[in-house]
Image (tube, rainbow, N blue to C red):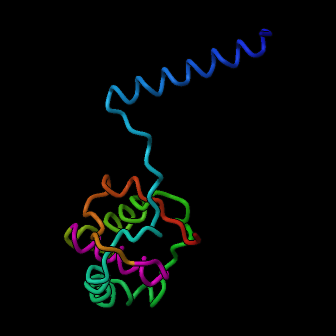
Amino acid sequence: MNLYRITLIAAGVALLAGASALAQNGATPAAAPTTVWDGVFTDAQAERGSAIYLSECSPCHGASPDLPRFDAKPLSELYSFIRTRMPDGMPGSLSAAQYSDVVAYLLRSSGLPAGATELPTTSSAMTGITFNLTK
């Protein structure tokens, strides 16, 4: 055997040993990142958000707010922005669930698919969800 083959075999053995150690420790491979295209809200949640948006948001923002500035960022940034700055003159006046409902409505109105689970009601729970306007 030449030195190159021995090095390759040693690297393969090290890789297998590392994978075995992970399996023995109960570690699992990292899950694929979640995006807004994975159905992170429900239709019922978006419906509730629609009513809130109509009464609280549309007088200033009209039918379509400026969402592209949040593209490719964690969904938590959109949620936090809305929760800490809206409605104008009364930021934070809605409940956490109402803000999540509004975000769900905004996602649906952007053409994103609904799913079986409601969007969470905390910014930290939305950190792992990426807001992408295109798939």
Residue drawn at the location 46% of the way across and 62% of the way down:
35
Q: Going by the image, does 7 lie left or right of 42?
A: right
- Number of numbered discs on residues: 0
Residue drawn at the location 38% of the way across and 30% of the way down:
23
Q: In the image, is residue 84 part of the stretch drawn in magenta?
A: no
Image coords of residue 48 (percent x, y): 25, 84
The answer to which of 78 and 4 lies nearer the viewer is 4
The answer to which of 103 and 129 lies nearer the viewer is 129
Q: Give the vertical position of 14 relative to 1 (above or below).
A: below
Image coords of residue 66 (percent x, y): 52, 77
Quadrant position of the C terminus in the picture:
bottom right
Q: In the image, is residue 100 part of the stretch drawn in magenta?
A: yes
The answer to which of 81 and 36 lies nearer the viewer is 36
Principal secondary structure, stretch drawn in magenta: helix
The answer to which of 26 and 134 lies nearer the viewer is 26
Residue drawn at the location 27% of the way across and 70% of the way down:
118
Image coords of residue 95 (percent x, y): 19, 70
Q: Going by the image, does 69 lie left or right of 4?
A: left
Q: Within the image, what quadrant is residue 40 found in?
A: bottom left
Q: Going by the image, does 13 lie left or right of 50?
A: right
Quadrant position of the N terminus in the picture:
top right
Q: Give the vertical position of 101 relative to 50 (above or below).
A: above
Q: Give the vertical position of 74 relative to 41 (above or below).
A: above
The single residue placed furthest to the left in the displayed view is 95
Image coords of residue 79 (percent x, y): 36, 65
Residue drawn at the location 36% of the way across and 73% of the way down:
103
Bounds of the magenta span? 96-113
